[in-house]
């Protein structure tokens, strides 16, 4: 949480600086970067709130806790970035041919300050990004802003040395182009988690084969693989067995740990139990 708080403080300061600098210099690219900074600040606030809620303890009525709130926050972040990116593109297209001049000294100076601040924010968030899809979303925002600051600096230098005013609009379009693909990937990942799909790095067929390879396991059904936060993997499965159930349970859990699955609910049953089961659709877990 401390990493998000530090990044939020830096982002808020840079947003104000870029907003003022964009207005004073007339730079569309700098204003575009400032608007993305605003989305970053909003996203980081949402991320902080999600972390605080996500730390609430498991209860009798919230048996999985509140980690899914972080995934909701990541999805909201991604949608915000997509919407603002589209706004940047629309504004840039309208700006083409306007002939409005840009004051490059202010533009470059403010963009350089933003670049340094983004480097600091990225460094703070980098070590925490693998622990939460929510922090990963915040890191995404900062990295795109970092690249946006570079684009603004380059555009300012081009205008200063060549007088090519359209470089400002081109830079703002480049910023939007860098934002959209990453935001789309984050949105897809978040939605996948919310839909309880199998995590991308897990192959259900391989998990099934590993369980079936255990001695005395004659079949499996109702294999479900999903994630609560985007980083962990949970599993439920029914194993049809004839052997010592205690030994088989230990072996099955060991096999699942090979896939990074530490939390599993395994039901062991004999072949005669099938008459009492209500089965899910065949291969539902692999969809």
Image: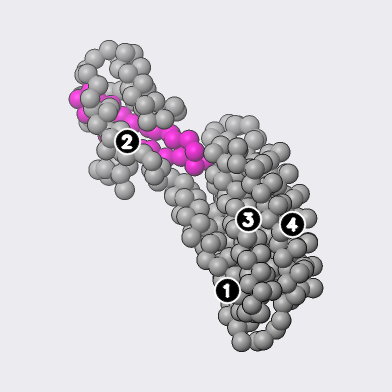
Work out whether mark 2 precedes mark 1 in sequence or the reverse, and give the earlier one: 1
Q: Which mark is residue 113?
A: 4
Work out whether mark 1 precedes mark 4 in sequence or the reverse, and give the earlier one: 4
Q: Quadrant of the N terminus?
A: top right
Work out whether mark 3 precedes mark 1 in sequence or the reverse, and give the earlier one: 3
Work out whether mark 4 precedes mark 2 in sequence or the reverse, and give the earlier one: 4
Question: Pointer 2: what residue?
Answer: 223
Residue drawn at (37%, 30%) of the image = 259
Is label 2 in contact with label 3 (beta carbons under 8 Å)? no
Callout 2: SS: strand
Q: Quadrant of residue 158?
A: bottom right
Question: Pointer 3: what residue?
Answer: 146
Question: Pointer 1: what residue?
Answer: 170
Work out whether mark 2 precedes mark 3 in sequence or the reverse, and give the earlier one: 3
Query: Mostly what secondary structure, the magenta segment?
Result: strand
Where residue 149 appears, as percent x and y from the top left, is 65, 60
Q: What distance separates the C-alpha of mark 4 from that of mark 2?
A: 52 Å
């Amino acid at each position: 949480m401390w990493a998000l708080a530090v990044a939020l403080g830096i982002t808020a300061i840079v947003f104000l600086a870029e907003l003022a600098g964009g207005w004073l210099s007339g730079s569309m690219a700098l204003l575009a970067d400032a608007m993305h900074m605003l989305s970053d600040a909003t996203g980081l606030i949402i991320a902080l709130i999600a972390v605080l809620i996500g730390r609430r303890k498991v209860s009798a009525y919230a048996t999985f806790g509140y980690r899914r709130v972080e995934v909701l926050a990541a999805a909201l972040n991604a949608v915000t970035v997509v919407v603002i990116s589209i706004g940047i593109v629309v504004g840039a297209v309208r700006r083409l041919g306007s002939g409005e001049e840009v004051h490059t000294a202010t533009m470059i100076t403010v963009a350089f300050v933003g670049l340094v601040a983004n480097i600091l924010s990225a460094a703070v968030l980098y070590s925490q990004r693998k622990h939460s899809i929510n922090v990963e979303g915040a890191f995404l925002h900062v990295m795109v802003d970092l690249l946006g600051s570079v684009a603004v600096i380059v555009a300012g230098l081009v205008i200063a040395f060549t007088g090519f005013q359209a470089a400002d609009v081109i830079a703002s379009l480049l910023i939007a182009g860098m934002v959209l693909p990453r935001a789309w990937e984050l949105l897809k990942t978040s939605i996948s988690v919310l839909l309880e799909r199998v995590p991308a790095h897990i192959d259900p067929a391989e998990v099934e084969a590993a369980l079936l390879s255990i001695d005395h396991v004659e079949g499996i059904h109702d294999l479900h693989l999903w994630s609560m936060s985007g980083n962990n993997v949970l599993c439920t499965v029914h194993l049809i067995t004839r052997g010592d159930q205690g030994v088989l349970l230990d072996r099955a859990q060991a096999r699942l740990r090979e896939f990074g699955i530490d939390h599993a609910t395994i039901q062991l049953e004999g072949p005669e139990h099938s008459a009492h089961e209500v089965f899910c659709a065949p291969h539902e877990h692999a969809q």
